Image (cartoon, helix red, strand yellow):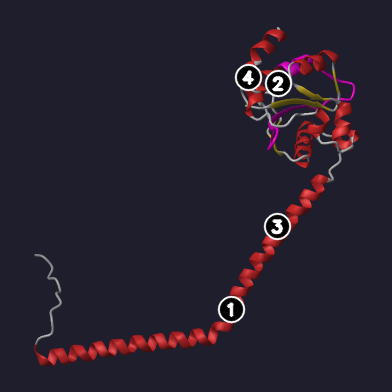
Amino acid sequence: MGRARLRLRAPRGRGEQLAAAVVGAAVGWMLLRTAAVAGQVALRAWPLTVTVLAAVVGYGVWRMAQAAGERRTRALMRARLRITLEEFDAMDDRQFEYALRDLLIRDGFHARQVGRAGDQGADVIAQHRRLGRMVIQAKHTTVAARVGSHVMYQVKGTAGPVHRADIAVVVTNGRITRDARTWGDRHQVYWVDRDRLGQWAQDGIPLPQLLRLPAGRGRRRGARLARGTATSTSAAG
């Protein structure tokens, strides 16, 4: 047996119509009264409301100003960043990579440290508005150690095809063999040995100026690096 449904019906007769009118008037009066009370409460509480809103807005402005000040401070510190060769020698491999990242940021690059197992020849990747994308292979070593040509071959083989880089650079706090320097110069793999690292990090010479990187390369150099992979591979053999 289904449940009976309540259905509203129009008032019948003068008595019901009069009662409905009275109820409607009472409801309307209650609504007006409620609105009036709410308005009075809001009117009495407006100083507190304004104070709370002002505090919230003020806190937001203060946080924005604080964040902007911190960004300016970091930018100023990076602009003044200087790292000595002795400090580089005391670092471990990961610290060395982060230090190179900070130097690139100082020089106007957007840079990030990416070195890890299986990094395929990239420890730091940087982007520059005029120069394009740069891949850095960092070789932290003892002062007497030397970086050989095989590192140049590796960077040449992965910079363009894997990382889509426009510029490939090998950086070490040690030395680079003569054959490696010659091969890098011939195949457009830039290198920063101990002497150049001192000029870059300690003397403050920007890396593009130090390496004489021409502007306006964009993706074109990345394509040249990719095309040169076969040549570099055969040369390595």
Circles 3, 4 touching at the beta carbon (< 8 Å) = no
Q: Residues within 10 Å of mark 2 (few under 14, many from 20)?
A: many
The image position of residue 175, as x and y in percent, is 86, 22
Left or right relative to 186: residue 36: left
Q: Residues within 10 Å of mark 1 (few under 14, many from 20)?
A: few
Q: Secondary structure at mark 4?
A: helix
**Picture disc at residue 155:** 2
Q: Residue at x 81, y 45 (%)?
A: 79
Q: Amino acid at mark 3?
A: Ala
- State the mark number for residue 23: none
* Residue topped by disc 3: 67
Which of the two discs, 1 and 4, sits closer to the camera?
A: 4
Within 10 Å of disc 3 (Cα), the crowding (few <14, some 14-19, many 20+) is: few
Q: Are marks 4 and 2 in contact (CB under 8 Å)?
A: no
* Separation of marks 1 and 3 at Cα, in angstroms: 26 Å
Residue nearest the observer in this picture, 85 or 195? 195
What's the magenta region? 125-153
Which residue is tagged 1?
A: 50
Label for residue 226? 4
Give the quarter of the image for residue 217: top right
Tag 1 and tag 2, C-beta contact below 8 Å: no
